[in-house]
Amino acid sequence: MHDIKTFINTPLNELKKMRVGEKVELLTYKKDRKIVITKQDQGTFHVVEDGFEHKEFRNVEAAKLEHLLKQLKSVEFPKNRKYYMVKHRL
């Protein structure tokens, strides 16, 4: 369980350490909404939003991932103070 203030930095730091194909899931406290980020290459990611809205973002560059996470946070985690982060390693 993590504080919502670390919603951007903690997943980005974990993704830097991960290998291609590994995933990070960001879940709400109730675990009814989530964002799944899969590392495709060293510089690109696949992001799936599964909550209020269901969207896929393919080939997101590392530089644009931070901005995308800020947008998704405001949609999927609007009033949350805590979130879960689950790492899926190969």
Image (cartoon, rainbow, N blue to C red):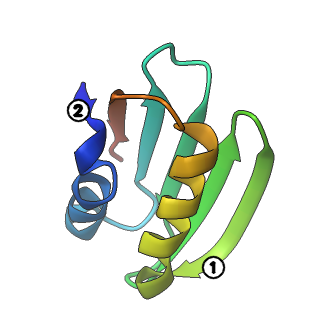
Classed neighbour count for the residue bearing mark 2: other residues with Cα under 10 Å, few (<14), some (14–19), many (≥20):
some
Q: Secondary structure at mark 1?
A: strand
Tell me if 59 is positioned left or right of 63 in this view: right
Tell me if 52 is positioned left or right of 29 in this view: right
Classed neighbour count for the residue bearing mark 1: other residues with Cα under 10 Å, few (<14), some (14–19), many (≥20):
some
Relative to 2, residue 56 above or below: below
Tell me if 41 is positioned left or right of 8 in this view: right
Residue for badge 1: 59
Q: Secondary structure at mark 2?
A: strand
- Residue 10 picture location, percent across and down: 23, 53
| Residue at point 34%, 28% (across, down) | 81
Quadrant for residue 41, please give it: bottom left
Front-lying residue, 85 or 76: 76
Front-lying residue, 17 or 64: 64
Q: Are the two marked residues, 1 and 2, in contact with CB atoms closer than 8 angstroms?
A: no
Mark nearer the viewer, 1 or 2: 2
Relative to 69, residue 60 above or below: below
| Residue at point 79%, 42% (across, down) | 53
Q: Residue furthest top?
A: 30
- Residue 23 picture location, percent across and down: 43, 50
Callout count? 2
Question: What number is the disc on residue 85?
Answer: none
Mark 1 residue type = Asn
Mark 2 residue type = His
Front-lying residue, 61 or 68: 68
| Residue at point 36%, 30% (across, down) | 83
> The N terminus appears in which quarter of the rendering?
top left
- Residue 35 picture location, percent across and down: 56, 44
- Residue 56 picture location, percent across and down: 74, 59
Residue for badge 2: 2
| Residue at point 59%, 65% (across, down) | 46
